[in-house]
Image: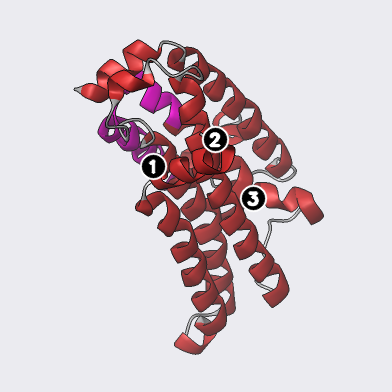
Amino acid sequence: MRPLDLWSHEIRRAGPAALLAPPVLVVLIALLAAFGTRLGSREGNTAWFLMIALEAGIPLVSGIAAASLIGRDRAVELQLTLPTGYRSTLLRRLAVTAGWSCLCALAASALLIVTGWWDLPPGAPHGPAGQLAWLSPALWLTALGLLAAAAFRGTTAAATVVASVWVFEQVFSSVFRESPVFRLLHLFATTRGTAPGEWLPNRLTLLSTALLLAAAAWLLLGDAERTLEGEAK
């Protein structure tokens, strides 16, 4: 199979939900940026809603997509005979879904910057480092989704783990903000707040722990037979 055909196949296997959700979210952000104040929302509220749509919405979409990677192949037995291995197949599919989410997030953040709605907390760096507002939580939840998919070998349980962590951090945001340890793992430090000077350490901690989650997922996915047995059930 030619590389172009291979990637086209993985794009189709990623599923319509994973491909449609990020641009739909970008369109909603654009509409809110254009008409938020005209609908009666105060500027501060509009800016907060726009940033939380970016910081929380894109990571949730990316994490759920990663959790749904396993279970999209009909010919399970055939996967075991492929020379590249099932782990490579999943990583290509992950590159499609996560890469598409990141492109959409970049478009949304560029829109907010151009329109003046880009609103980072005091002390947060500007320029390219400011993109960690959405990139760090997106990569963390993506890695968590992949790990959960590898551990549970199915979509429903893995997606539930991602959604539960997302909801937990939203509901108990104050607990994360007040804890000197857990606030470094707070996914929503941009919109929910964090201690002065700890925004960048928070974003970097999320990136480093995302690497650990991804490494654990990589090890579990090395046993293709175990993974595919769970998919076949």
Q: Residues within 10 Å of mark 3 (few under 14, many from 20)?
A: many
> Secondary structure beneath disc 2?
helix
Q: Note whether 76 is above or below 72 in the view shown.
A: above
Q: Nearer the viewer, residue 21 or 182?
A: 21
Q: Which residues are magenta?
A: 146-171
Tell me where residue 183 sits by quadrant.
top right
Q: CA distance from mark 1 to mark 3?
A: 29 Å
Q: Nearer the viewer, residue 57 or 85?
A: 85
Q: The disc labelled 3 sits on which kind of residue?
A: Ala
Can you identify the residue that label 3 sits on?
133
Q: Note whether 143 is above or below 51 in the view shown.
A: above
Determine which of the numbered discs, if any, sits on residue 64 in the image.
none
Q: Is residue 89 magenta?
A: no
Position of residue 214 measured from the top left corner of the image (x, y, whole percent): 54, 24
Residues tagged 2 and 3 counted as in contact (Cβ below 8 A): no
Can you identify the residue that label 2 sits on?
140
Can you identify the residue that label 1 sits on?
13
Q: Is residue 184 visible?
A: yes
- Residue at x 48% of width, y 57% of height: 22
Position of residue 79 measured from the top left corner of the image (x, y, whole percent): 37, 21
Left or right, 217 with respect to 105, comes to left
> Secondary structure beneath disc 3?
helix
